Structures are given as C-alpha cells and as structure tokens.
Image (cartoon, rainbow, N blue to C red):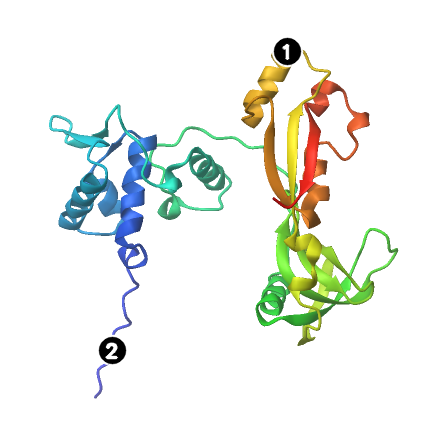
C-alpha cells in the first residue's frame, strides 16, 4: 500500500518579501505610525522574532538617527530627526494605500499601514470589464498581435467589427483604454475596453508601437492660478497644486493630453467661472 504524499504547504509571506522590502516596511511604519516593534514584522512577513531583530539592527546601520528604543514601552520610536530612507514612505504612497484599502482593492496582508484613520471617498459607477477580453488584450500586447473585435463607438449607431493592433494600456481617470493601431482608419487611436465584445486574437501586428508618435511624445504643461481669482483664492490654488512661484508643471503623453485637459477643465475654459476653473494653462511645450 502506497502512502499518499501530503500536499506542499503554501509559501509563507516571508518567501515573497526580501530583506530590502522589510527595511522599507520599517521605514514606512516609523514615518507614519511613529513606532515599530518586532511583532509588527513577525505578523506582516511571517518571519521569526530573531529575524525581525536582525532586520531592525540592519535598519539601524542604514539610518542610525531614525529610531530609538523605548525600554518602558518596549517599542522603537521615530526620533525628531527622522528622515525617510525609501521613496515608498512618501505621502502619496500612504494616501494611495489608504484609498486602495478603503475601496477594497488591497487587504491588510498587502498594506504597510498600521493604524488607519477613517477614510471616505467619492464613489463612481463601476465599469464592468470582461476578464476574457482583458486576457486577450494583454496577450496581444505581449506578443505584438492584432485583435479582432466588435466595438461600440460613440459615433456609430450599432456595434461594428474592428481590427486593431494594441500596444499599450491607458487610464484616463475614469476608464481603461487600449492604445492601438486602427486598421479601419489607418491611425493610432484609444479604444475603451468596456465597449468591446467578441475579442479574439489575430495575426502578428503589422504596425509597431514605435510608429505611434503621439504616444512616445511628451507634452509639458505649465499651470498657474486663474487670473480672475482673488489673492487669497490664488494662494489656496497654489497650495492645492504645490506651485512654486505661482506655477506648477507636469508632463503628459501627447496621446493622453485631451484627458488631462478635460480633468483640469481646460478643454473648455470659457465655460466656467474662475472659482470653477481654478487654473489656466500658462505654457505648453513638446518634449523636454
């Protein structure tokens, strides 16, 4: 009689997170929680207490002035001279994780945040995407293949067959698109994934992404407060956008410029009041 082998145990969290990742965790918790103990590392990464002690000792070597041990509370505390070592401890990382956790996108096992404040967010109607469609599109981009599909555009009364060669994905703040060469129009265009059906993988693509100049070209936008705002309102806008000297600049792919301008209400600047508009386009330049 043969003995059935036991199924292998699932890998512990520690096998998927290297030592550098644990140092990032220490840095993150110290910056935003102000404290850390070995139990935090043990619980999150599934490592031993001795390994947690070694990780903290390693972090002390990297940033000796960032933490001090409080013997009465038995916890490491961030010092008043704390300076983050890793970019992953940035404010944007914290806020993005708070939002993703509140929205149910990530769970506790993937979130570095310890204590969390109550978080609310403005809901938007969900956009259902077909998993089959997405899988085909991903494979098409990876293998440089064309895709046959039925597409419902805003300009057509009925869905119509299309042949496209996708090479990238794009998110406009509300919807996911694929950037693709449209064989019908012989031009690169954006296609909303949710409007696709009957997606099947086709032949190798005959139009490479290097030909999509609007995708590879960057546009630099310079914004300033709307001139119709009061001095106090202008200062508020400067703070909102992190402006220096009353100006802030950012880069955007030329192919996505329309969406960027629409988000900033700059696609129809004459339609809003200064309070609604808030910013105006001071300068737009290609490249750089």
* Residue at the disc numbered 1: 231
Tell me residue 44's x, y (percent).
29, 46
Residue 111 at x, y percent in the picture: 38, 43
Crowd class of label 2 (few under 14; some 14 to 19; many from 20; radius 10 Å): few
User: Relative to 182, is 97 on the left or the right?
Assistant: left
Q: On the image, which quarter does residue 58 sit in?
A: top left
- Find residue 244 and name its label: none
Q: Is residue 57 above or below residue 209?
A: above
Above/below status of 19 relative to 240 = below
252 vs 6, nearest the viewer = 252
User: Which of pointers 2 and 1 lies earlier in the amino acid sequence?
Assistant: 2
**Residue found farthest to the bottom:** 1
> How far apart are the alpha carbons under marks 2 and 1?
75 Å
State the residue at coordinates (80%, 64%). 186
Residue with the most extreme front position: 288
Task: Decide which of 233, 147 is in the foreground and name it.
Answer: 233
Farthest residue toward the right?
157
Identify whether 227 is placed above or below 101: above
Kindly identify the residue that appears in the image at 64 percent across and 32 percent down: 222
Residues at badges 2 and 1 in contact (C-beta under 8 Å)?
Answer: no
Q: Secondary structure at mark 1?
A: helix
Q: Is residue 238 above or below residue 252?
A: above
Q: Quadrant of the N terminus?
A: bottom left
């Amino acid at each position: 009689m043969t003995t059935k082998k036991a199924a292998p145990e699932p890998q512990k969290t520690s096998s998927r997170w290297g030592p550098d990742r644990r140092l990032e965790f220490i840095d993150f918790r110290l910056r935003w929680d102000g404290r850390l103990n070995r139990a935090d590392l043990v619980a999150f990464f599934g490592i031993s207490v001795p390994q947690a002690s070694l990780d903290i000792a390693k972090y002390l070597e990297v940033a000796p002035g960032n933490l001090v041990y409080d013997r009465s509370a038995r916890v490491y505390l961030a010092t008043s001279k704390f300076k983050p070592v890793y970019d992953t401890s940035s404010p944007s990382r914290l806020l993005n994780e708070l939002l993703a956790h509140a929205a149910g996108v990530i769970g506790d096992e993937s979130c570095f945040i310890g204590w969390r404040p109550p978080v609310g967010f403005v809901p938007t109607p969900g956009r259902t995407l077909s998993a089959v469609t997405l899988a085909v599109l991903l494979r098409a981009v990876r293998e440089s293949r064309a895709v046959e599909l039925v597409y419902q555009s805003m300009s057509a009364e009925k869905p119509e067959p299309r042949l496209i060669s996708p090479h990238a994905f794009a998110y406009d703040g509300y919807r996911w698109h694929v950037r693709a060469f449209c064989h019908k129009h012989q031009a690169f265009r954006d296609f909303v994934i949710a409007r696709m059906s009957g997606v099947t993988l086709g032949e190798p693509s005959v139009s490479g992404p290097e030909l999509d100049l609007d995708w590879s070209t960057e546009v630099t936008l310079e914004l300033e407060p709307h001139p119709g705002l009061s001095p106090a309102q202008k200062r508020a806008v400067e703070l909102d956008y992190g402006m220096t000297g009353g100006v802030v600049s950012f880069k955007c792919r030329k192919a996505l410029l329309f969406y960027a301008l629409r988000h900033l209400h700059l696609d129809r600047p004459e339609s809003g009041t200064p309070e609604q508009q808030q910013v105006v386009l001071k300068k737009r330049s290609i490249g750089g």
